[in-house]
Image (tube, rainbow, N blue to C red):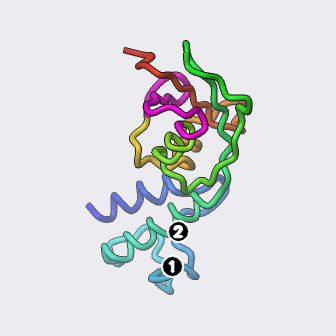
Amino acid sequence: PVAILAQVCSAVMAEPGEDAEPEASMPGAPDEDIGDNWSVVGQMDLDQYLHHRLTKRRDCKVMLFVDAIGAAPRLKQKKFKVDGTWQFYQVEEFLKGSLKVAKLYLYVNNFFSPLPEEYVADLFQCHKSGGGAQLAITYSLEPAFA
C-alpha cells in the first residue's frame, strides 16, 4: 500500500519535464536511487518527501482575478498578486477587509467554494484560467449558486 501511494503521489507531484523521484538534497531522502522500490522508504521519509514537494510547489506568487456577482460592492482593482502559501481563508479575510463587509461568499471559476484551508497555489494549479495566468475568484454578499 505504501509503495502504491508513493508512486501515485510522486506522479502527481512531478513537475512537467521533471523526474518524480526524491532529490538527494532533500532532508531525509535516501542516498541511493530507489526507483520504483518505495517499500524501502519508511513512512516518515515519505511524509517528509511529500511535505518538501508541496512546500516547494507552493513557494510562488499567484495572480488572482477578483470580480463581484450581483449587488456586491465592486473593487477598483481586480487583480491581486498573493503568496501561494496563503490559505483560502486569508483571501476571504483580505477581501472582506478591502470591501468592509462582515460576510462574503467566494467561488473559484464561478463553480465552487473551496475549503478555507485550501492553499492558493494548489487551487491555481488545478483551476487556473485566463490562459493559465490567473485564478478567477468571484464573490457575493449572498449565496450565488444553489
Residue furthest out toward the left: 1
- Whether the residues at callouts 1 and 2 have beta carbons within 8 Å, the answer is yes
Instruction: Determine the residue positioned at 53% across, 64% down.
Output: 55
**Depth check: 100 or 66 in front?**
100
Q: Which label was assigned to residue 33?
A: 1
Instruction: Determine the residue positioned at 65% across, 38% down.
Output: 64
Q: Residues within 10 Å of mark 2 (few under 14, many from 20)?
A: some
Closer mark to the observer between disc 1 and disc 2: 2
Q: Is residue 120 above or below residue 77?
A: below
Instruction: Determine the residue positioned at 67% across, 28% down.
Output: 75
**Depth check: 93 or 51 in front?**
93
Q: Position of residue 92 (x, y in %)?
A: 50, 40
Residue where numbered disc 2 is placed: 21
Mark 1 residue element: loop
Identity, as a three-letter code, of the amino acid under mark 1: Asp
Magenta-span inclusion, residue 101:
yes
Question: What stretch of residues is rendered in magenta?
Answer: 96-113
Location of residue 8 by image quarter: bottom left
Residue furthest out toward the front: 100
Q: Position of residue 23 (x, y in %)?
A: 56, 75
**Depth check: 75 or 91 in front?**
75
Q: Position of residue 43 (x, y in %)?
A: 31, 73
Q: Earlier in the sequence, mark 1 or mark 2?
A: 2
Mark 2 residue element: loop
Quarter the N terminus occupies? bottom left
